[in-house]
Amino acid sequence: QKEVEQDPGPLSVPEGAIVSLNCTYSNSAFQYFMWYRQYSRKGPELLMYTYSSGNKEDGRFTAQVDKSSKYISLFIRDSQPSDSATYLCAMSDGDMRFGAGTRLTVKP
Amino acid sequence: GAGVSQSPRYKVAKRGQDVALRCDPISGHVSLFWYQQALGQGPEFLTYFQNEAQLDKSGLPSDRFFAERPEGSVSTLKIQRTQQEDSAVYLCASSPQSPNEKLFFGSGTQLSVL
């Protein structure tokens, strides 16, 4: 079993939809939780960063961390075609581990 | 430059060749990481530098892989006697000293070993 599990998708939604992405993990020592966005042929870029449990909102993006369930989520409201990318969850206890990434397509 | 720069963007090597991949981190960033990303997978950690010191090389898959950062800025990842299973995208990331979790990635070098 991998330390970080992420459904690879692909996920296809119409423009304006609410998107829900999530990851589960097994290492209870993880304290930092991140979401990275990766466009085709580009490196990942940091989207959201959360320390420990709770919610964090930034514009159309909301990150949630539930440490008791070892479950993190990223919600995208009013999704746009420009949100089409692969979304990688990542978590760290000093050593960072990435999920496999979920490929998202937002159709106009 | 404003971001992490990697070169070359693409590299095709014949099996058995040596390759060298270069990373120019963001100016002033102390920490530098190398990751390997296979198709359809997330990045896998290879090695980590703080300034010129290589503090963690536990992710290097074999002794054919070697990384250096002699002056604490530019880094080179060298792969000797390349094998087909080395084909992947090699990503470099840099970070301000703390926290290391906020990584800034380059666009990567796509290595194809034939």
Image (spheres, rainbow, N blue to C red):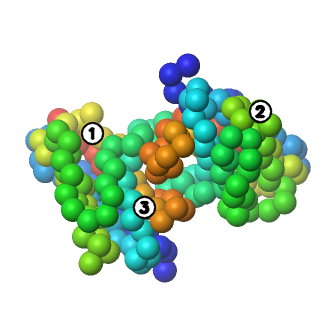
Mark drawn on residue A91: 3
- Hey, what amino acid is under mark 2? Glu
Q: CA distance from mark 2 to mark 3?
A: 30 Å
Do the residues at pointers 2 and 1 share their chain?
Answer: no
Q: Are marks 2 and 3 in contact (CB under 8 Å)?
A: no
> In this view of the protein, which residue sits in the foreground, B10 or B75?
B75
Q: CA distance from mark 2 to mark 1?
A: 38 Å
Comparing marks 2 and 3, which lies closer to the viewer?
A: 2
**Mark 2 falls within which chain?**
B
A18 on left or right of B80:
left
Q: Is residue A92 above or below residue B102?
A: below
> In this view of the protein, which residue sits in the foreground, A107 or A41?
A41
Earlier in the chain: of badge 3 and badge 1, it is: 1
Visible residue check, residue B79: yes
From the image, tell me which residue sits under label 2.
B71
Residue at the image position 12 percent from the left and 41 percent from the top:
A78
Comparing marks 3 and 1, which lies closer to the viewer?
A: 3
Residue at the image position 70 percent from the left and 55 percent from the top:
B55
Visible residue check, residue B90: no
Comparing marks 2 and 1, which lies closer to the viewer?
A: 2
Do the residues at pointers 2 and 3 share their chain?
Answer: no
Q: Residues within 10 Å of mark 2 (few under 14, many from 20)?
A: few
From the image, tell me which residue sits under label 1.
A83
Q: Measuring from the top left, give residue B92's x and y in whole percent.
A: 61, 41
Q: Secondary structure at mark 1?
A: helix
> In the orientation shown, which residue stands out farthest toward the front?
B98
Q: Measuring from the top left, give residue A84's x and y in whole percent.
A: 30, 41
Q: Measuring from the top left, give residue A6's x and y in whole percent.
A: 38, 65
